[in-house]
Amino acid sequence: MVSSDLPAPAGIETRDDSDFMRLALELGDRARGRTGDNPHVGSVVVVDGRVLGYGWTGEPGQNHAEVSAISSAERRGHSVAGATLYATVEPCCFVGRTPACSATIIAKGIRRVVFAVRDPHPRVNGCGAAQLRAASIEVVEGVCVNEVELALGHWLRSHRERAPETHLVREGQ
Ligand SMILES: [Zn+2]
């Protein structure tokens, strides 16, 4: 680093996205082995560099990590409007056993979403990110991708192998 480099700005973005993503990764690890066929995702909700809520994937049929993190902030009296949400995997975008996380994130007024890897599920795979962007939410992909690939490798591989046609289509786009 040279002496003319500007110092880190005070306030909002003093901590790196990767710091919060690593926290989400640690939280997700708490759910390892207890999420059925869902990935053990972790999530944190951050405002002005402060973690207001956090969560991880529940058992099948229970809240996904993103909704758990939003709920945990709200339970403690925080509004998540304008917040940044970190999740290790792209938020889902279809109603399955639980409502779509993308719809909840949009409804709650989250301003920015950061995730590591796309959900390879054929009904998500970029659709969650696209829905968020269509709602004018800033979306950042690929933060700590190597660490998350390592943690969720088995689940990611099993879904990617099941849906090769989706990848072929995407590569041609
Ligand atoms: Zn979800």
Image (tube, rainbow, N blue to C red):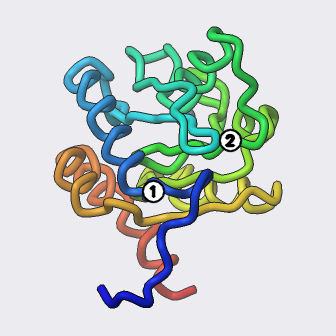
Residue 17's tag is 1
Q: Give the structural element (helix, strand or loop) at label 1.
A: helix
User: What's the amino acid at mark 1?
Assistant: Asp
Q: Amino acid at mark 2?
A: Ala
- For label 1, the crowd category at 10 Å Cα-Cα, with few meaning under 14, some 14 to 19 and many 20 or more, is some
Query: What label does residue 102 carry, if any?
Result: none
Q: Which residue is mark 2?
A: 83
Q: Residue at x 24, y 50 (%)?
A: 158
Which part of the image, by quadrant, shows the C terminus?
bottom right
Q: Is mark 1 within 8 Å of ligand 1?
A: no
How many badges with numbers are in the image? Answer: 2
Residue 40, x across and y down, in percent: 32, 32
Characterize the local packing of mark 2: few (<14), some (14-19) or many (20 or more) Cα atoms within 10 angstroms.
many
The image shows residue 21 at horizontal and vertical percentages of: 39, 48
Residue 92 against residue 117 in the figure, above or below: above
Quadrant in the rendering for residue 70: top right
Residue 102 at x, y percent in the picture: 67, 42
The residue located at (61%, 51%) in the rendering is 11
What residue do we see at 63% from left, 10% from top? Answer: 76
Q: Quadrant of ligand 1?
A: top right
Q: Is 29 left or right of 164, judged from the image as shown? A: left
